[in-house]
Amino acid sequence: MENTENINVPIMSEVFTKGHKPEYLFWVGCAGAFDNRYMKVAKAFATILDKLKTDFAVLGTEETCNGDPARRAGNEMLFQMQALSLIELFDSYEIKKIICICPHCYNIFKNEYPDLGGNYEVVHYTEFLSDELFKGNLNLDKSKLKGKTVTFHDPCYLGRANDIYDAPRKLINELGLKNKEMKRTKSFALCCGAGGSQMFKDAEKGNKEVFIERTEDALETNAGIIASSCPFCMTMLTDGLKYKNKEEEIKNLDLAELILNAMI
């Protein structure tokens, strides 16, 4: 994979103090900041932004959870405390546009923060990259991944909640990958099993856990790569591959990692 070590990641407080207001806030999210696996995705996307010469910055140590897990788990007071605190911070930096790598963060900023006075232009990174592709700014070498097969798992908060199905598939097509759709896809896609704060609680009674069934959907395609674009989905699908003893032969990669690997 592309080296992501020597990248320029501007910090909002530092650039703002110098009188510059970045066009985009790159919202890293809890997984991108603390989960070892998804840190690689956050670094990959930051590298892409740097290569595209995008005017962006991150909050760094000022970034806190946006309250999505709290609201999904039913703790409305905690959600509003976190949300109002962040809205105040965003306003202090005059933030207008936010790029998210997590569909859960994307959804709550776009659809739920406005109720508390937080109005921003929010984009998921697949939308952003698809737009850059259309503008001719994102140049990819199809030969790097040509011949490889991929199946894309639609995250619930990207697909059904926000109707974003085309952008990820446009990127997959531009990568030269052969896309094999699962039997349950797009609006009929099965949840990975982690949404609605299920990630943070014990499994309920049943014959099979959701992440295992979704992994089986992916394995039926015989694709060599399972592509995802959500930290929750990546965790569950990676666990599913381990459960099925398939982690050595089948890789679960985020679209940002695939894009970076093919960038010219």
Image (spheres, rainbow, N blue to C red):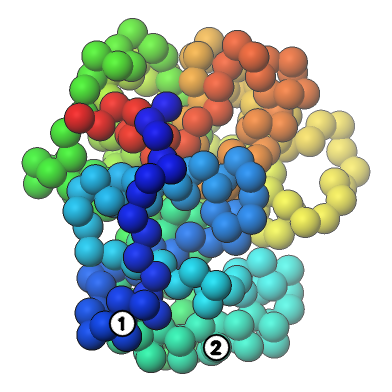
Residue 96 appears in which quarter of the rendering? bottom left
Assess disc 2: are there few (<14), some (14-19) or many (≥20) residues with their C-alpha within 10 Å of its C-alpha: few
Circle 1 SS class:
helix
Q: Residue placed at 42% from the left, 27% from the top?
A: 1
Mark 2 lies on a secondary structure that is helix
Which residue appears farthest toward the right when viewing the image? 205
Residue 88 rendering spot, x and y as whole percentages: 46, 91
Report the side of 225 relative to 232 (left or right).
left
Point out the frontmost of discs 2 and 1: 1
Above or below, 233 against 245 in this view is below
In the rendered image, the residue lying farthest to the left is: 136
Residue 263 visible within the image: yes
What residue is disc 2 on? 85
What numbered label is drawn on residue 118? Answer: none
On screen, residue 229 versus residue 219, left or right, reads left
x%, y% of residue 196? 67, 59
The one nearer the camera, 19 or 103, is 19
Residue at x 74% of width, y 54% of height? 198
Q: Position of residue 254 (x, y in %)?
A: 47, 36
Image point (73%, 52%), residue name: 199
The residue that disc 1 covers is 16
Residue 104 position (above or below residue 242): below
User: How many C-alpha atoms fall within 10 Å of the one at disc 1: few (<14), some, or many (≥20)?
Assistant: some
Question: Which amino acid does the dot numbered 1 rest on?
Answer: Phe
Where is residue 53? Give x, y as percent: 19, 53
Amino acid type shown at disc 2: Ser
